[in-house]
Image: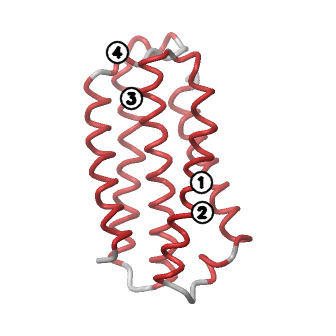
Amino acid sequence: MEEIDEAFNWLVLILSILTAALMQYPQLYPFPFPHHLLHPEITIMRLLLLPLTILVIAWLSSHLTQRQKVKIVLKCFAWIFALFILVMDVVLILAAIVGTHYISFFVVPGWMLAIAVYLVVIRNRYRQIFPESRFLTSMKIQVPFCVILFLITELHIAIFLGPF
């Protein structure tokens, strides 16, 4: 197994532990909307478990597929999505510590840091493993890829943290 895949496996393990810990104490995460205060455990579960499930399915699919192009896209998707989940977990922890009114100071820099780590570190490692991949070498593909995943993540958060 490649080192980068082993690192991802560890990241998923860490994300699972963080998710389990965060779900144990949903009352620590006061959301700005009153309907979340009634059942914060359901909001936290929707916010954290759905992305983790999608992440596991994408990563397993990347190992099961025989098509190299699909494998590369799924691995990249899984990495950037995992980094976004990590940012979401860290923001929730920071919100519990400093309060929700400071969340906006953490979210955008966190997403940008996740995208930068993906583009500079993860993508470059995969380019060494798959040097013939047009998907990995083209910034014209990578930038929209990151933007689309960012928008999907933002939509997910807006759905579960916004008013119903």
**Marks 2 and 1 close (CB-CB < 8 Å):** yes
Q: Which label lies toward us, 4 or 1?
A: 1
Estimate the spatial distance between the alpha carbons at disc 4 and disc 3, rounded to whole Å. Answer: 10 Å
Q: Is residue 15 above or below residue 142?
A: above
Q: Which residue is mark 3?
A: 44
Helix, strand or loop for disc 2: helix
Q: Earlier in the sequence, mark 4 or mark 1?
A: 4
Name the one closer to the observer, 114 or 49: 114
Question: Which amino acid type is marked by label 3?
Answer: Ile
Residue, x 38% and y 79% (percent of image)?
65
Q: Amino acid at mark 2?
A: Leu
In the image, residue 16 lies at what x, y percent?
Answer: 28, 45
Query: Residue placed at 55% from the left, 23% from the top?
Result: 164
> Dot 4, how many residues are within 10 Å of its Cα: few (below 14), some (14-19), or many (20+)?
some
Determine the secondary structure under disc 1: helix
Q: Which residue is mark 2?
A: 119
Q: Up-down: is 1 above or below 44?
A: below
Residue at 50%, 15% (x, y): give it.
99
Task: Tell me the distance, in whole angstroms, between the alpha carbons under discs 3 and 2.
Answer: 29 Å
Q: For mark 4, give the secondary structure.
A: helix
Say whether disc 3 or disc 2 marks the residue closer to the N-terminus. Answer: 3
Q: Are marks 3 and 2 in contact (CB under 8 Å)?
A: no
